[in-house]
Structure formats: C-alpha cells, structure tokens
Image: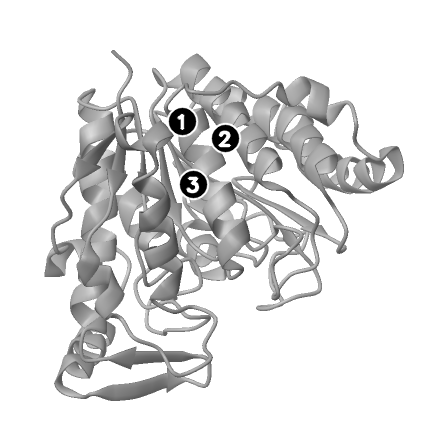
Amino acid sequence: MHKTGVVRDDRYLNHRTSPGHPENHRRLEAIYAVLESSDLSDRLENILPRAADKKEIELIHSPEYLKRIAQTAEREFSYLTPDTNTSSGSYLAALLAAGGLLEAIDKVNSGELNNAMALVRPPGHHAEKGRAMGFCLFNNVAIGAKFARRVLGLDRVLIVDWDVHHGNGTQHSFENDPSVLFFSVHQYPLYPGTGLFTEVGIGKGEGFTMNLPLPKGYGDGEYAAIFETLLKPAALEFNPDIILVSAGFDAHFSDPLGGMRLSSAGYAALTRSLMDIASACCSGKLVLTLEGGYHLGALEASIRSVLLELSESSQTDIRHMAGESDSKKLDYAVSRFTHVHRPFWKSL
C-alpha cells in the first residue's frame, strides 16, 4: 500500500517573527488546516519530528553559529539580520525543522514510507555555514543531504530547489562535492542575487551545481518543460539514491515576493516529474521540505496539489503541460543551460 508521510507539529508555530513579516506562523496554520480535509486526512501518515542534535546541525553549520542561535532562546525577540529574526521559541522550532526532515528521510530511505513532505518552519535554504539570512536559521535540506550521505551511507543525493529565490546556502554547502547534485530554478534578478548559469561548482564538484536563473513570467508549461528536458536527463545520468526538494511556493502567480506564473497544478506537475525520476533511479525515494510561499490561499492550494500527487491520488500529465510552454521562454533557458553544462553531462 502506498504511504506518504507528513511532518507536522504545533511547536513550529512558536517561531514568531516581527509584525507584518511574510514568513509567519499563519503559513503553517493554513497548511495544517488543509491536512484535515476529507480527501487528504486518510491518505497521509504523520511523522513525529525530533530535535536534531548538535552533531547533525554541525554537519553543515559551525559550532559558533549553533551556539549563537541557541542563545536566542534566552531572549523574547532577536534580530539576526534585517529580515531574519527570532523569538524565544525559534531555536527549538529550528532544531525540530531539521530533525523532522531527518526523520522523514530516514523513514523513506528504510522503505517504511514511499515518500514524504516536511511541513516545517523556519525555512532553510538561504542559511550559510555561519550566517542566518533570508528568513532561514538552519539549512534543513543541506543537513538532510549530509545526513543521507554520512549517517545513512547513501552514495549520491539529488537536491532540487524550485523556490523562487536561489538556495545560496545549499549551493555553497556542496559546490565542491560530486556526491550531491544541486539543481535550482529561480527568478533572477531577485534576492539573494546568486545562482547564475555559470555557477557550476568548484574543484571536484565542477558540473554538479546546476542553476537556471530565469526572468520573471515563467509559468506551468515552461517549468514543466525545464524539468522534463533539462533536469530529468541529468538526474537519470547522475542516478541518485534519494531526491530531496527545497519546496518553496513563492513562484506561484499570486505570491507577493516573486514574479513567476506557476499555479497549484504546475506544482503538482513538478512533483510528478520528480516522482518519475525517483521511480527510475531510487525506488521512488523522494522527500520534500517546505521553504517559501507567502500567499496563504496559493500556499494552501499548492500544498494540497502536491500532497495529492505524492499520495498517488492524482496523476498529472506533465508532458502535456510541457507541450504548452512558450517556445521563446523555453529556448532562452535551454540554450544557456546546455551551453554551460554539456561539457559535464553526456545526456545534455
């Protein structure tokens, strides 16, 4: 029987941000309400999160940085950067965000679950080794990839980042590591200003960082075609043991922080593409973790679509969607991407 796991916990709501901040507790309140809907509640298995321990956090972050974040629990409110702040509950929430994803990875890797989604906060993909930024404290997906390699003993991990913002922290964590393929499609120019086509990794990791910085206005068809024509061939050639996803929903056409045109149906299609890749490479082992997404209605609809896809309650025809892409927009992405990456990948 197909089993899809979901990490959820009300303690994630205890990470409180400043009034008016887009990354706030209402995001998860809205998502958790969706989980109670009749067409989802009996299709998902809850995963109880645990707090990541010191050694797990330090797979990515420095001991000094971990200590700095731990100290925020002693203060009612702290600013780490102008856009990244904490409350007294943020440190535990951040440990649980990383640990919840690790629990999901462990259960999917063992075969206890087919796939999973960690509906956690604070998000993570901007967090650097020793620096918080972009609403992020600990880099959950990077910690998850290191955990899969070092603790679970997997040889290769694919990280896909479809957040509208580039995952700078994730890229920097693995840019010299050929065991982790990092693929990011994001809007550019936009915060944090990284993720150019020519950023391909360094040293032994050259070719294992793949960036698609796109002008605003790309929608379902273009994203679907990019996943099918660029990501899929490279992913199949890389042959990962598990696929992790930084799943931000701020590329939705309603999101206030981005300028892309994805719909909830588009997110379902991207999920289906990754499920197809995972089925071909790694027995379907696919784990998503929540990053951005700041329009509550769009977030609710998109999460619902993704979970219906993950649980095999729907089966989106991504090839049909890809066939409806704007040829000029697609040509821009494909030509620049293949020009940079063809020397590294036979499939391109």
**Does dot 1 land on a helix, a strand or a loop?**
helix
Q: Is residue 344 left or right of residue 247?
A: right
Q: Quadrant of the N terminus?
A: top left
Percent coordinates x, y for residue 272 in the rendering: 51, 24
**Does dot 3 land on a helix, a strand or a loop?**
strand
**128 above or below 56?**
below
Say whether disc 1 or disc 2 marks the residue closer to the N-terminus. 2
Check residue 310 in the rendering and tell me which mark sits there, or answer none.
Answer: 1
| Number of residues whose C-alpha sits closer than 10 Å to that of mark 1, classed few (under 14), some (14–19) or many (20 or more) | many
**Does dot 2 land on a helix, a strand or a loop?**
helix
Percent coordinates x, y for residue 311 in the rendering: 37, 23
Q: Is residue 69 left or right of residue 140?
A: left
Say which amino acid is labelled 1.
Answer: Leu
In front: mark 2 or mark 3? 2
Check residue 271 in the rendering and tell me which mark sits there, or answer none.
Answer: 2
Check residue 245 in the rendering and tell me which mark sits there, or answer none.
Answer: 3
Contact (CB < 8 A) between labels 1 and 2? yes
